[in-house]
Amino acid sequence: MHQGQRTFVDFMIDAGVLTFGDFTTKSGRKTPYFVNTGKYRTGTQLATLGRAYADAIERSFPQGFDCLFGPAYKGIPLVVAVAIAFAERGREVPFCFNRKETKDHGEGGVLVGHAPRDGDRVLIVEDVTTAGTSIRETVPILRAAAKVSLAGLVVSVDRQERAGETSARSALAEVGAEFGMPTAAIVTIDEIIGHMGARLTEADRARIAEYRAKYGARPDAG
């Protein structure tokens, strides 16, 4: 774990995005930690977030990409922030995102921003992948727009837990294998817990251990 990742964990905690306690996920699981990117609410926070994503992309996707895509809704501000971060580094990166409903007036269509072209390598920017639902919904939209290839998927936190009760791999690994694309995260839950150290109470650690024993991905399964 490098310093940038440690700084990012502290940043999430300061922003109220990463919290520990008792929560219920969308899937109905009772979880001792929660990541809610909807808590980012200032321009400075989005600028910091965009740079952290850009760092992870440069580190994890050396094969490159041609455009960025953010699945609605939370992926929209994320993909914009990442595009701005790359612009700060002297690289203009086109981006697009999808509407939840097709627009039937004006220019119409489902995608906003860059119009994907045949041969484009699209890198998807998401917040947290728990079941891969948004990816499964939006990849067909991208492929309907042009003959694109998927350069990969990057998320802020890899929860390192199984997508379903019968899965052995993490949800992130599962969706990557399904669509034949590499995946990466700014940080993993293992790295977060390691960095938190004494800031986690014994009760927190016990709940986390119990949760991960029940839902955690097998290390040898990806």
Image (cartoon, rainbow, N blue to C red):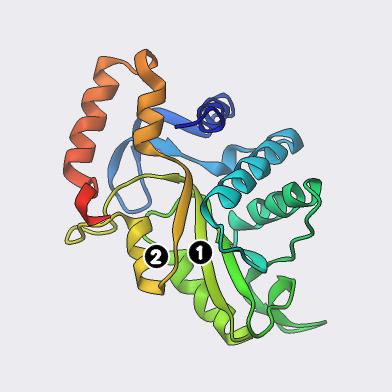
Whichever of labels 1 and 2 marks the residue nearer the N terminus, that label is 1
- Name the residue beneath numbered marker 1: 152
36 sits to left or right of 206: right
Alpha carbon separation for disc pair 1 and 2: 8 Å
Name the kind of residue labelled 2 in the image: Gly
Q: Please state, as top left, top right, bottom left or bottom right, where the N terminus lies in the image.
A: top left
Does the CB distance between marks 1 and 2 fall below 8 Å? yes
Residue toward you, 36 or 147:
147
User: From the viewer's perspective, is residue 52 above or below residue 183?
Assistant: above
Instruction: Say the numbered circle drawn on residue 85.
Output: none
Front position in the image: 44 or 119: 119
Taking the image as drawn, is residue 71 in sight?
A: no
Outermost residue toward the top?
A: 198
Q: Identity of the amino acid at label 1?
A: Gly
Q: Which of 22/54 is in front?
A: 54
Residue depicted at x 39% and y 27% = 20
* Residue at numbered disc 2: 176
79 is higher (above) or lower (below) than 32 = below
